[in-house]
Image: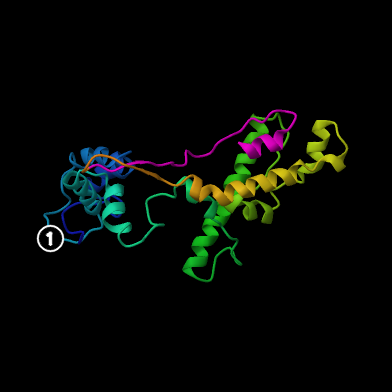
Amino acid sequence: MSHNAGFTYGLFGNSPVDKMYQADNPLDAPSLQAFIEKVATKPLLYQPGEKWVYSVSVDIQGYLVQKLSGQTFPDFLRDRIFTPLGMKDTGFMVPAAKLPRVEITRPETALGRTSTESIQSGLYHGHVGAIRNLLAALTVEAVNGRRPQVVGTGGFARVVEAEHLVDEIVPELAWQMGRPIRFGGERKGVEERSRYMIDIAEHALATVEKTGKEGFKRYNTREPLGTVMVIATWTYPVPTAGKS
């Protein structure tokens, strides 16, 4: 825990050992087991106790916790630390049930006047840029040069609205359906259903605890899978996407 165990990250030096870490990149391993297998092939940067260097020693401690406890490191932290202390929103990732609570706000300045504002700016403009790039790629690859319609929901709604990335979709929807624009009100229904789903998400997608044998903890947990693309039916594209 004091970063003097002889290891390194390979990020702050140019020694032969640092170069071995840079080439193999143990931190990019998909699991702690794969990580430890990579680190085990590397020599120490220095004799333990002789120096202080930021290193993978704390990551190795996580692996040791797994081996000694018989639990994954996230489960151990949840059961032994987070839950007893009431830290219900602490973890390595945001579970699906809590995603609707995530909101990214636009800072007043791009650079930020404080460290917090600078971090917020990076998150905000990073997401805006990612959305713009995704729309550009979809326009070229998926819809033959025609820009896709964009609907913002949940925490991202204000992001896309503030940067004018959300379209006025009622006329487009009415046009697709061959109906007068005054009948393009499906958007309101979709919005109402979407907001209801957001409201119940934290409860509906919460982890389900199961009864089990003594010494075992059984539960079903729902985790986000990442970006999902929905191909909607042509007659009611927005309602279908909203229900999805």
Quadrant containing the C terminus is: top right
- Residue beneath the point at 88% across and 37% down: 180
Where residue 206 sits in the image (x, y, percent)? Answer: 45, 47
Instruction: Answer with left or right where residue 54 lies relative to residue 150.
Output: left
> Magenta segment, principal secondary structure?
loop
Label 1 sits on what residue type?
Glu
Q: Is residue 79 magenta?
A: no
Quadrant containing the N terminus is: bottom left
Instruction: Answer with left or right where residue 166 lies relative to residue 177.
Output: left
Colouring style: rainbow
Instruction: Answer with left or right where residue 132 lies relative to residue 112.
Output: right
Instruction: Answer with left or right where residue 185 lies relative to residue 14.
Output: right
Which residues lie in the magenta part?
Answer: 216-244
Which residue bears the numbered disc 1?
Answer: 50
Residue 106, compared with residue 34, is above or below; it is below
Where residue 108 sits in the image (x, y, percent)? Answer: 61, 67
- Quarter assignment of residue 178: top right
Q: Secondary structure at mark 1?
A: loop
- Residue beneath the point at 14% across and 53% down: 46
Q: Is residue 238 visible?
A: yes
Where residue 192 sits in the image (x, y, percent)? Answer: 68, 48
- Quarter assignment of residue 139: top right
Q: Is residue 240 magenta?
A: yes
